[in-house]
Amino acid sequence: MVSLAACTWLATKRGIKIFDSKNGSCTTLTIADGLSSDDVRSLAEDSDGQIWAGTSYGLNRIQYVPNEGRKHKTIVSAFDLSDGLNGMVFNPNAVYTDKTGKIYLGTN
């Protein structure tokens, strides 16, 4: 997926890879950075530029803050059943954004 910030985001079984073409950096987000699981199943971007990641163990919202230098900042929030999710295991590539910008993510 290519974000509004012109970064390429890849969902993998070992986290999320972020390639920032503006500064040539590559970053990996994992559980150590706040992801619910390293097994990332789907990615979507909302109208505010926040990335939503469905994993094998919950949902994450990622705020990407680009920087002039090679380092950037990511703020990762996690959501689970206590936040109202219907399921914790997100299906691979089961993501849809409608005309109004509402994002739908499929769970088991």
Image: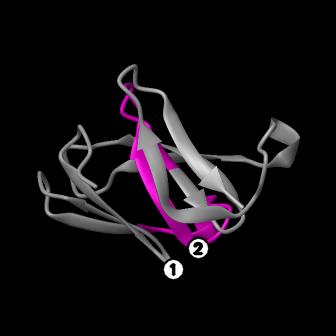
Q: Look at the image and tell me whether residue 63 can be seen.
A: no
Closer to us: 87 or 63: 87
- Residue 11 magenta-drawn? no
| Residue under pointer 2 | 38
Q: Residue at x 29, y 43 (%)?
A: 66
The kind of secondary structure element at disc 1 is loop
The label shown at residue 42 is none
The answer to whether residue 47 is magenta is yes
Residue at image coords 44%, 43%: 96
From which residue to which does the magenta span run? Answer: 28-52
Distance between the alpha carbons at the discs numbered 2 and 1: 6 Å
Residue 41 place in picture, x, y as percent: 52, 66
Q: Residue 18 location in percent, x, y?
A: 32, 62
- Which percent across, then down, holds residue 69? 21, 51
* One can see residue 83 in this view: yes
At 75% from the left and 58% from the top, the residue drawn is 88
User: What residue type is disc 1 on?
Assistant: Lys
> Which image quarter holds the C terminus?
bottom right
Q: Which mark is residue 13?
A: 1
**Residues under numbered marks 2 and 1 in contact, where contact means CB atoms less than 8 Å apart:** yes
- Residue 59 lies, with reference to residue 93, above or below; the image says above
On the picture, is 3 further left or further right than 12?
Answer: left
Give the residue at the far top of this rendering. 100
In the picture, measured across the screen, residue 59 lies left or right of residue 2, that is: right
